[in-house]
Image (spheres, grey):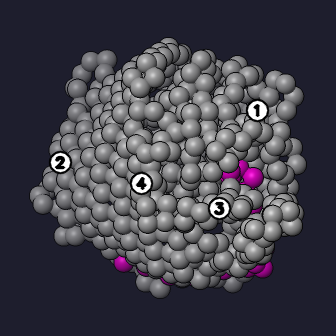
Amino acid sequence: MNVFRFALFAGTSLALSAPVLAQDATTAPSSDAPAATSSADDFHEDVIVVTAGGLNRLDMLAGTSVMDGVDLQRNLSGQIGEVLTEIPGVSATSFSPGASRPVLRGFQGDRVRVLLDGIGSIDASNTSADHAVTIDPLTADKVEVLRGPAVLLYGSSAIGGAVNVIDKRIPQKVPNESIHVDALVGADTAYDLREGGASADVPLSSELVFHVDGSWRKTDDVEIAGYALSDSLRQELLEEAAADPDHADALIAQANQRGVLPSSATETLSLGSGLAWIGDGASLGVSVGYYDTQYGVPIRPGAHADEEGAVSIDLEQWRADLRGSVDLGGGFFEQLKTRWGYSDYTHVELEGDETGTTFAVKGVEGRVELIQREQDGWRGSFGGQYMFRDFSAVGEEAFVPPNTTESFAAFTLQEVDLDPFEVEFGGRFEHTGIKTETLGLDRSFNGFSGALGLAWNVAPDVRIGLNGSRAARAPSAEELFANGPHIATQQFEIGDPDLKMETAWGLEAYARAVVGGADLGLSVYQSWFDDFVYLQATGDVIDELPVYAQMQQGAKHFGVEAEASVPLFDVGPFKAVGDVQGDYVRAILADGTPVPRIPPLSALGALELQSDPVDLRAEVQWFDGQDRVAPLETPTEGFAQVNMSVAWKPLRGGKNVTVMLQANNLFDVEGRRHASFTKDFVPLAGRNVKVSVKTSF
């Protein structure tokens, strides 16, 4: 699969170093170094680590992965949640083809931060599962996944993990050529996909570089393998049809819908440009981006499902970003780094041709970090972070009142090399204030999060470690103040303004090794939550919508993640490599009931034949059924999908072209993600043949 494990500290300029396990701290590259790029020609490399500002590597984040190059092209999708579902410990909300956020170790929503180069997406995607993430994977350079509470150095809402998308909108180096171009085009059958994206970097001087990019993506209603509805929901509608002659024809038609998922088409446009000055000992860059998408929202079927007309969301975001650094010369601190983002976001929920509720978010997020000068194997950084979000919803179904959220944080991370041992420890204090003038409510929270990790280099290529963490998360404005119908999710949501701060203690043990050329990784973790917040169906109905309420009690999360990439044999010009991975999560509330929407046991096995011009890959991804469900939650049947791909690199040397032909879900199997609120009426795509061409020159 060629997905590499790495370690990362929040909000820093990132650098790559390899090999990980044998790397000596005195020869580690500076965090100022430009990010290394993975080549499509390199498959079985040493494990790559993304170093933190002032650090060699960060082992508190045992569950980490990065996807780029051919892997990113193979898994590319319109929403970032769908891009990452072949990584251990990662699922997706899969609300619809136009809206899908990552689910990390069973956590979703406000417990998972989705970041653009270390700064939040500053949209409404954490507010509700039907809201799209405003980051376009089509123009991503690489995507980094961090699983586990130690990533709270990104902010309290990263208690479950973080996904960091790296693009090139603010250039980090001046191209050697007169212009550097990256481009990708693609088409497929299941979505009737048509997509294209390109970016260009132009050096204006030896220190100044200009960037421009754009992408467009359009899909029709997605083709599915069987019925749109699960067996249990079909039976429910057919029974309702027998008891309601006035709506019988409509109900039977909904129950028998198959082959195509109605109201699932999408169209997305993104544009951006950036300018960066990269001097000797200092840099400063800015960028501006525009994101526009309109996508259909499948509605839960029933007697009144079509009365308001088809539901869709029209979304728009303007965004500005800044990144800078300056060397400080001698002294305790050697470098100052800063990163800021501003967003003006709006989306409208359309009911047929009529405008429904309008959601708006204006926000700013930034951080400043001081990098320590390494002394006697001791290295680290100190920093501060600020975030402000102004949220409003206007319309009859504005289920959350206007509110503002503001937070201030201070953090540090330190690493001590005690060869063959290494110790990392860090802490974060965060103050969060949330208020709504409409309700006259004002809540404030003070939370401390910390982590301590010990790593032992048992041998040059074998590393084991144990990490402990304490995490604290302030409840979000939506969890506190929601109270009303939400047409897109077909729920009546009720918050709790008296929610307490959510806290968790965590332990994680891991082992990593390179044995006989094979990359091996294993992580086992447990978290103990106090005042865990979760959205639970109550069984009540208001305005013909099922009521979901925010609740709070203790909880335990246990999980295992394992992966191995093993060279098998050489066949003529081909090298054969086998990939095996799996993950498991079990989450139980204090009262003994399961936490809602926890993904089931899953596994993936793949065989890849690689040569200089051609890579061949066949894989099977299996998901167990999930029958450990919360009250009023429906179980999900297991399924397995077979995928095949051919990547052809016809040109060698200075120009890089990858032509990829894929057949996903080759046997047209019906599949539903248990983490999805809409799984009973929004299945995954059926058989899909896709072709894409990626080039860089």
- Pick whichever of labels 3 and 4 is earlier in the sequence: 3
**Which amino acid, by three-letter code, is at mark 2?**
Trp
- Pick whichever of labels 3 and 2 is earlier in the sequence: 2
For residue 602, above or below residue 552: below
Question: Circle 3 is placed at which residue position?
Answer: 305
**Which amino acid, by three-letter code, is at mark 4?**
Val
Q: Are marks 4 and 2 in contact (CB under 8 Å)?
A: no
- Counting other residues with Cα less than 10 Å from the Cα at mark 2, is it few (<14), some (14-19), or many (20 or more)? many
Calculate the distance from the C-alpha at mark 1 to the C-alpha at mark 2: 46 Å
Q: Is residue 357 visible?
A: yes
Inspect the magenta stretch and tell me whether residue 264 lies in it. no
**Which amino acid, by three-letter code, is at mark 3?**
Ala
Question: Circle 2 is placed at which residue position?
Answer: 277
In terms of secondary structure, what is the magenta stretch mainly?
loop
For residue 39, above or below residue 572: above
Q: Which residue is the extreme one toward the front?
A: 246
Calculate the distance from the C-alpha at mark 3 to the C-alpha at mark 4: 19 Å
- Residue 312: x and y in percent read 50, 62
The residue drawn where x is 86% and y is 62% is 243
Calculate the distance from the C-alpha at mark 4 to the C-alpha at mark 2: 38 Å
In the image, which residues are magenta?
655-677
Inspect the magenta stretch and tell me whether residue 656 lies in it. yes
Calculate the distance from the C-alpha at mark 3 to the C-alpha at mark 2: 54 Å
- Pick whichever of labels 4 and 2 is earlier in the sequence: 2
Q: Are marks 1 and 4 in contact (CB under 8 Å)?
A: no
Question: Circle 4 is placed at which residue position?
Answer: 348
**Which amino acid, by three-letter code, is at mark 1?**
His
Q: Give the quarter of the figure containing the N terminus.
A: bottom right
The residue drawn where x is 27% and y is 67% is 200
